[in-house]
């Protein structure tokens, strides 16, 4: 009888530990994804600032928030890819100059 209760107890404890590990891993992945998105947005904002100062700006690689952001600018299209851990998020922004005023026409995440 004692062996039966021990087996039940070990099974329940093992299941609880397994669920806990899955939840922690999922939360960590979600957090990394959110930081990667924020880093990509920072890359786009940096590119906009650099484009205001220099029309010939073509992009760069930055270290932001424990990850990296690769920013490219081609024909007014800014693409910023933020990578943190195993998570990668990409944002694309369309810009144009109208009477020497830099205007953002779209800002979206690319999947």
Image: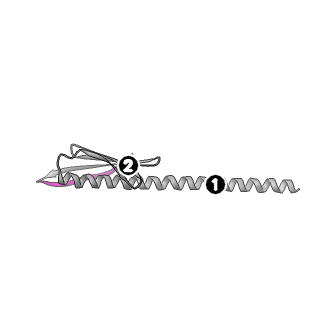
> Is residue 84 left or right of 15 when viewed as pictured?
left
Q: Name the residue under label 1.
A: 19
66 with respect to 23 (left or right): left
Quadrant location of the C terminus? top left
Lateral position of residue 17 relative to residue 44, left or right: right
Q: Nearer the viewer, residue 1 or 62?
A: 62
Extreme residue in the top direction: 74
| Residue 87 percent coordinates (x, y) | 45, 48
Q: Hey, which residue is sitting farthest right in the picture? A: 1
Mark 1 closeness class: few <14, some 14–19, many ≥20 residues within 10 Å: few
Using the image, tell me which numbered label, if any, was put on residue 82.
none
Q: Give the image location of residue 57, x and y in percent.
A: 21, 47
Q: Which residue is drawn at 50% across and 52% down?
A: 29
Q: What are the residue bounds of the magenta stretch? A: 99-111
| Residue drawn at point x = 17 percent, y = 50 percent | 54
Of marks 1 and 2, which one's residue comes earlier in the chain? 1
C-alpha span from label 1 to label 2: 31 Å
Q: Mark 2 = which residue?
A: 68
């Amino acid at each position: 009888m004692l062996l039966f209760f021990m087996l039940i107890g070990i099974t329940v404890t093992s299941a609880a530990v397994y669920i806990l590990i899955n939840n922690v891993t999922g939360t960590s992945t979600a957090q990394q994804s959110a930081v990667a998105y924020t880093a990509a947005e920072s890359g786009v904002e940096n590119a906009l600032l650099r484009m205001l100062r220099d029309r010939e700006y073509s992009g760069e690689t930055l270290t932001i928030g424990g990850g990296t952001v690769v920013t490219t600018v081609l024909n007014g299209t800014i693409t910023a890819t933020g990578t943190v851990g195993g998570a990668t998020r990409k944002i694309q922004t369309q810009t144009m100059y109208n009477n020497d005023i830099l205007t953002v026409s779209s800002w979206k995440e690319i999947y």
